[in-house]
Image (cartoon, helix red, strand yellow):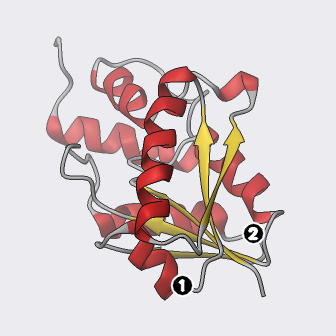
Amino acid sequence: MRTGVYPGTFDPITLGHMDIIRRGAKLVDKLVIGVTTNASKSPMFTVEERLAMVRRETADLPGVEVVAFDSLLMDFAESMGAAIIVRGLRAVADFEYEYQMAGMNQQLNNRVETVFLMADVALQPIASRLVKEIALYGGAIDRFVPKRVVQEVVARVEKIGKKGS
């Protein structure tokens, strides 16, 4: 069985993430969505909340498993028996970062390949960071995230307070 890993913070999961998940799942028998933390990001949702979100949004996709991890990606990939890491690319800036990361990952474990999927043109500008910023300023995010995620983000913004109010 060929296993792939698609890692990310998914804070929140976006339509862009869902596109990469659907397409990545076609490349492998099992796609493990690895929900992680990133020390350089300030999450809006806890790991548990993000796990629940991603599990709900991917529940209808065969061969997709969602798990949390807090380790080096290559150690996680190895523990999942993954042969590939799936990464989405939106723009040149993504490529530069991902290219460097893929090189470092190859140095750590050359048995796991990184596969890049170009974002759907209509979804290229979507980034979780921007979705949160739009929501915090009271903007509509329904074109960027799944419907139930809209509700969760709006509820969280109401709890923490909008900016610019």
Mark 1 vs mark 2: in front: 1
Residue 6 lies left or right of residue 109; in this view the side is right
Q: Position of residue 62 (x, y in %)?
A: 78, 75
Which picture quadrant has residue 110?
bottom right
Quadrant containing the C terminus in the rendered view = top left
Q: Residue at x 32, y 43 (%)?
A: 155
Q: Position of residue 150 (x, y in %)?
A: 49, 40
Q: CA distance from mark 1 to mark 2?
A: 21 Å
Q: Residue at x 50, y 61 (%)?
A: 106
For the residue pair 27 and 163, the one nearer the viewer reads as: 27
Whether residue 111 can be seen here: yes
Residue 80, numbered circle: 1
Q: Secondary structure at mark 1?
A: loop
Point out the tag, 1 or 2, that comes first from the N-terminus: 2
Mark 1, Cα crowd under 10 Å, few <14 / some 14-19 / many 20+, is: some
Residue 60, numbered circle: 2
For the residue pair 62 and 95, the one nearer the viewer reads as: 95
